[in-house]
Amino acid sequence: MHQASRPAARKEGDRPLPRRRIDAAATPNQLIEKYCSDILTSPGMSIESQCIQHGDTTVLEHSAAVTACCALIARALRVPVDERALMRGALLHDYFLYDWHVYDPSHRLHGFTHPGRACKNAIRDFGVGRREQSMIRHHMFPLTPTPPTCREGAILCVADKIVATRETVHGFALKLRARQRSREERNAR
Ligand SMILES: [Fe+2]
Ligand SMILES: [Fe+2]
């Protein structure tokens, strides 16, 4: 779908930062703005805003919610983290850039293959560093066999499960409510 014309050059900011406790004065949204404004305004995010992830939640909404959840977990645990890598890796963790609900042979085994695709796209479009790459590649553990190799990846792995469960349950509740409403309308006729 989205084709970048050339690989993004590796930037100074893609080097891992020294780990420190997350900025307690900043809200998750302020941290996302601080570290990810280039990602948020990119064409890839427009694609994410048109693709559904779980229930009625788009991939962009899911990714932003997971990123905010990562900030909250890191703050609650009080562990030093690479704040920039945490925010950017989390926002790009599902950067696979297609609607996995649409049938296509290339979408088969999406659960297993999308971390690799997301990582390749993130390197191509944003030149993400090794820490972000590791986070993206291992976020589906334990569905994929290799566990996260850094603490930012472990936080992402947990945040993704929490947010995905919440979205799936919400989507299921919406479906049930819609079914109930149509049954009531049928009975009222
Ligand atoms: Fe994912
Ligand atoms: Fe996800």
Image (cartoon, grey):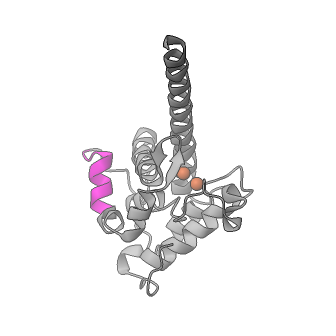
Along the line of sight, which residue is nearer the eye, 6 or 19? 6
What is the x, y in percent for residue 99?
A: 55, 58
In the rendered image, is residue 4 in sight? yes
Q: Please tell me whether residue 124 is drawn above or below residue 117 in the rendered image.
A: below
Is 169 above or below relative to 125? above
| Nearer to the camera, 115 or 177 | 177
Q: What stretch is highlighted in magenta?
A: 25-35
Residue 38, horizontal then vertical, whole percent: 31, 69
Q: Residue furthest top?
A: 188
Q: In which quarter of the image is residue 126?
A: bottom left
The answer to which image quadrant residue 40 occupies is bottom left
x 38%, y 81%: residue: 11
Residue 98 versus residue 154: which sits nearer the camera? 98
Q: Does any portion of residue 18 appear in the rendered image?
A: no
Q: Quick check: 41 left or right of 14?
A: left
Residue 110 lies, in percent from the top left, at 67, 58
Residue depicted at 54% across the width and 20% down the height? 180
Determine if the magenta segment contains residue 85: no
What is the number of callouts on the image? 0
Q: Position of residue 162 (x, y in %)?
A: 54, 38
Q: Quadrant of ligand 1?
A: bottom right
